[in-house]
Structures are given as C-alpha cells and as structure tokens.
Amino acid sequence: MWRGWRSRVACERGSFTAELAAGLPALMLLLVAGLTAVNAVGTRVACVDAAREAALAAARGEPGTIAGTRYAPDGAEVAVTVAGDRVTATVRAPVRTLGAGLPRLVVSGEAVAALEPGAPGPVP
C-alpha cells in the first residue's frame, strides 16, 4: 500500500517545475500587455485633458496650442483648428510599450469648444 504511493510521488516529482517553465512566457506576455494597456489608457486621458484645455483657451482668444502643450504628455502633437463658431483641438501622443520590439502605439484625444461671445478672435 505505501509502496504504490511512493512510486506515484516519485513519478510526479518535478512536474510543477516543468509546468511553470511552460506557462511562464505566457504569463509574462499577459503582464506586458496589461501594463501597456494601462499606460495607453492613462496617456489617452492626458490627451483628452490637454485637448480640452487647448480648445477652451483658443475659444477665449488665448493661444490654444501653447495651453494644450502645457498639459499634453511628452512627445505629443497638439493641433487646433477653427471652423465657424467652433474650435476643435486634437492631441496625439505615442504610448510607451514595455517591449523594445513591439510596434509603437499612438492614442489621441479630441475636444470641441464654442467661441466665447465678446472674446477676441480664436488663436490656434
């Protein structure tokens, strides 16, 4: 009775190590993908905030691009356009990925503001 139990334990010895070695790369891939996704969401929120500030500043007659650049993430591009009585600001920023060989992601945020009555003309 005890002899069968010992031989069964001896056969399974090291199986956890083998399973861990097989599953660890997949676990690391999921970790990198998850952290990159969290970073992308944070960068997008920063882009939307910067676009909102740029659109509001341009609608008040202040330089919108400068206001957007102040709030934008590093390496972001800020563009402000005026069409009729609306100001549209777009901010595009690259997302840092945790792998050197991974493709570069770019996220963007956009905001629209109406021109303020009585304010000087919009300044992109």
Image (spheres, rainbow, N blue to C red):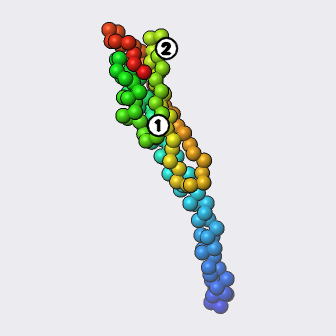
- What residue lies at 42% left-to-right and 21% top-to-bottom? 124
Corner quadrant of residue 120: top left
In the image, which disc is placed on residue 64?
none
- What residue lies at 54% left-to-right and 39% top-to-bottom? 106
Q: Is residue 11 left or right of residue 67?
A: right
Instruction: State whether residue 2 appears in this view.
Output: yes
Corner quadrant of residue 86: top left
Judged from the image, the secondary structure of the residue bearing numbered disc 1 is loop
Using the numbered discs, state the Cα–Cα distance from disc 1 to disc 2 in whole angstroms: 23 Å
Above-or-below relation of 89 to 97: above
Q: Quadrant of the N terminus?
A: bottom right
Q: Position of residue 49 (x, y in %)?
A: 40, 32
Mark 1 residue crowding within 10 angstroms, few (<14) / some (14–19) / many (20+): many
Residue type pointed to by label 2: Ala
In the image, which disc is placed on residue 83?
2
- What residue lies at 53% left-to-right and 56% top-to-bottom? 31
Is residue 110 or residue 21 the one in the foreground? 110
Q: Is residue 40 left or right of residue 14?
A: left
Q: Position of residue 63 (x, y in %)?
A: 37, 23
Q: Is residue 25 left or right of residue 47?
A: right
Q: Position of residue 42 (x, y in %)?
A: 45, 42
In the image, which disc is placed on residue 76?
1
Mark 2 residue crowding within 10 angstroms, few (<14) / some (14–19) / many (20+): few
The mark tally for this picture is 2
Is residue 45 or residue 102 the one in the foreground? 102
- What residue lies at 52% left-to-right and 37% top-to-bottom? 107
Residue contact between numbered discs 1 and 2, judged by CB atoms under 8 Å:
no
Judged from the image, the secondary structure of the residue bearing numbered disc 2 is strand
Q: Position of residue 8 (x, y in %)?
A: 66, 83
Q: Quick one: label 1 or label 2, which is nearer the N terminus?
A: 1
Residue that protrudes farthest toward the left in the picture: 118
